[in-house]
Amino acid sequence: MALSKTCCSLLGLLIVYLLAMDVVNGAGECGKTPIRSAALSLSPCLGAGSNARAKVPPMCCTKVNALIKTAPKCLCAVLLSPLASKAGIKPAIAITIPKRCNIKRRPVGKKCGRYIVP
């Protein structure tokens, strides 16, 4: 009985360790880049992400294009993150940035939470 409890405990610890390693090694939407870092890299987009009439800065377009190429799901994860919300980003507006930047290979029609990439 004691051996059974020890095996279960060790198995549980192994599962927790493996799950933690997936998070550390970048099994998330942004690959190996922590979502916070990905969000901070999009700081040139702050104005355009909260105001649909704001001109999208070229640096924002460059950053969004690179993010879409390397980790397409990351953009959605960033836009829906608590950090983006705290920064005043409005997902319904921010999701239009790839179109406003005229990014040809944007994920048109893909869902991002309750929003769809135009």
Image (cartoon, rainbow, N blue to C red):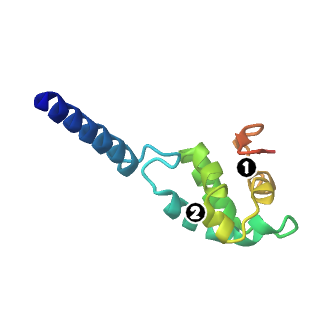
**For numbered disc 1, what is the local secondary structure?**
loop
Q: State whether residue 22 is above or below residue 94.
A: above
Looking at the picture, tell me which residue is in the foreground, 28 or 33.
Answer: 28
Where residue 24 sits in the image (x, y, percent)?
36, 51
Give the amino acid type for the residue marked by disc 1 in the picture: Ile
Q: Residue at x 81, y 45 (%)?
A: 118
Residue 103 bears which disc, if any? 1
Where residue 48 sits in the image (x, y, percent)?
77, 67
Measure the alpha-carbon separation of dots 2 and 1: 19 Å
Q: Residue furthest left?
A: 3
| Left or right placement of residue 95 versus residue 43 in this view | right
Q: Quadrant of residue 80?
A: bottom right
Q: Quadrant of residue 85?
A: bottom right
Looking at the picture, tell me which residue is in the foreground, 111 or 63.
Answer: 111
Give the amino acid type for the residue marked by disc 2 in the picture: Ala
Where residue 34 sits in the image (x, y, percent)?
46, 57
Q: Quadrant of residue 116?
A: top right
Looking at the picture, tell me which residue is in the foreground, 25 or 19.
Answer: 19
